[in-house]
Amino acid sequence: MATSFATASTTVIGLGSSLSSKRTCLSSDFVKPVMVRSPLRQAKASGGRFTCMSFQSDWLRRDLNVIGFGLIGWLVPSSVPAIDGKSLTGLFFESIGAELAHFPTPPALTSQFWLWLICWHLGLFITLTFGQIGFKGRTDKYF
């Protein structure tokens, strides 16, 4: 078993022979040496851009009309008094006021504020998403 271990005089390249200037080069027909190129130089060769012909660079296609109409399109129906004679927007703003009354203390997990916050924003984001789909679909003549 002692013969299977390396002797103390054997050194591993890079650990015990730091003063040695001799480098070993392993070569075979299976692995060929390849010149490593800097990825920074490759990016500069194409102007620093990677382009794809089928993907539009302005993929978001932001339009302020969608944001404006989407916000109005959510504020109007959420302001209809449908929950015990109160609107979702009114309940949300009332809960904000109630939580600001004891400002340094955060809202409790059982507070109605979280329910109105999630419902109001979920409705807003759904309205904005469908507004973006509808407005851009109409612009691109899908329907």
Image (cartoon, grey):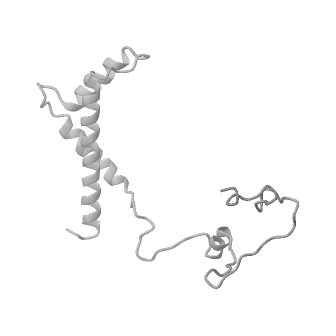
Tag count: 0
Q: Residue 72: give x, y in percent of width and height.
A: 26, 44
Which residue is drawn at the image coordinates 38% and 14% (left, top)? 102
**Figure check: 92 above or below 135:** above
Which residue is drawn at the image coordinates 20% and 37% (left, top)? 78
Left or right placement of residue 5 versus residue 141 in this view: right
Q: Give whichever of 84, 7 is nearer the camera.
A: 7
Which residue is drawn at the image coordinates 63% and 80% (left, top)? 31
Quadrant in which the N terminus appears: bottom right
Q: Quadrant of residue 23?
A: bottom right
Q: Quadrant of residue 121?
A: top left
Q: Give whichever of 122, 20 is nearer the camera.
A: 20
Which residue is drawn at the image coordinates 24% and 36% (left, top)? 119
Left or right placement of residue 26 versus residue 140 in this view: right
Left or right placement of residue 101 versus residue 126 in this view: right
Quadrant in which the C terminus appears: bottom left
Q: Quadrant of residue 111?
A: top left
Q: Is residue 97 visible?
A: yes
Q: Give whichever of 25, 36 is nearer the camera.
A: 25
**Figure check: 2 above or below 108:** below
Q: Residue 53: give x, y in percent of width and height.
A: 44, 77
Q: Residue furthest top?
A: 102
**Figure check: 106 above or below 31:** above
Left or right placement of residue 52 versus residue 49 in this view: left
**Figure check: 22 above or below 111:** below
Q: Residue 63: give x, y in percent of width and height.
A: 37, 56
Q: Residue 27: give x, y in percent of width and height.
A: 70, 80
Q: Is residue 94 visible?
A: no
